[in-house]
């Protein structure tokens, strides 16, 4: 299965995502902010980064700005945020995000399908993210 980096500052969500993805057979590494994620990607090349945008120390956008393009090209980036229709979502797409999903619209049990879809598909257009709702 895939190597996945979960970058989420909420400890309960971080743990839930890790449990769900590990249960699906993925190798999961977690970080609680962008700075920690950046450090972990020095020795870990994820197939997918599940990335929150609003985090302490270093947010998701700053992580994407600093993370080398050579690493971004080898990974899919799934933004998980609660910032609906924000300029940050458009910025995330410009920085390499493949898909953006609103966390509050997404039940944790739908995470497996979102990850599979993101790993399988090309970039989702920014306009689609504004209308994107998680599968039921």
Image: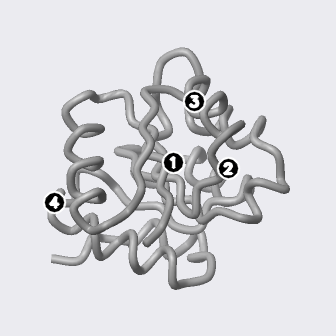
Name the element at disc 1: loop
* Label 3 Cα neighbours within 10 Å, binned few <14 / some 14-19 / many ≥20: many
Residue at screen point 21% across, 61% down: 23
Say which of marks 1 and 4 sits in front.
4
Query: Which numbered disc, 3 or 2, marks the residue that appears first in the sequence?
Result: 3
Q: Which residue in the protein does label 4 denote?
A: 107
Marker disc for residue 91: 2
Say which of marks 3 and 2 sits in front.
3
Marker disc for residue 86: 1
Say which of marks 3 and 4 sits in front.
3
Q: Is residue 131 rendered to the left or right of residue 99?
A: left
Q: Nearer the viewer, residue 70 or 80?
A: 70
Query: Which numbered disc, 2 or 1, marks the residue that appears first in the sequence?
Result: 1
Measure the alpha-carbon separation of dots 1 and 4: 21 Å
Q: Are marks 1 and 3 in contact (CB under 8 Å)?
A: no
Name the element at disc 4: loop
Marker disc for residue 14: none
Name the element at disc 3: helix
């Amino acid at each position: 299965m895939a190597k996945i980096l979960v970058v989420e500052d909420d400890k309960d969500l971080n743990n839930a995502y890790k449990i769900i993805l590990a249960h699906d057979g993925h190798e999961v590494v977690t970080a609680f902010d962008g700075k920690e994620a950046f450090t972990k990607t020095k020795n870990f090349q994820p197939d997918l980064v599940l990335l929150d945008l609003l985090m302490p120390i270093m947010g998701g956008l700053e992580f994407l700005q600093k993370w080398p393009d050579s690493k971004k090209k080898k990974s899919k980036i799934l933004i998980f945020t609660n910032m609906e229709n924000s300029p940050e979502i458009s910025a995330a797409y410009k920085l390499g995000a493949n898909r953006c999903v609103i966390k509050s619209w997404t039940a944790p049990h739908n995470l497996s399908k979102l990850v599979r879809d993101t790993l399988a598909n090309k970039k989702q257009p920014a306009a689609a993210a504004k209308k994107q709702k998680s599968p039921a």
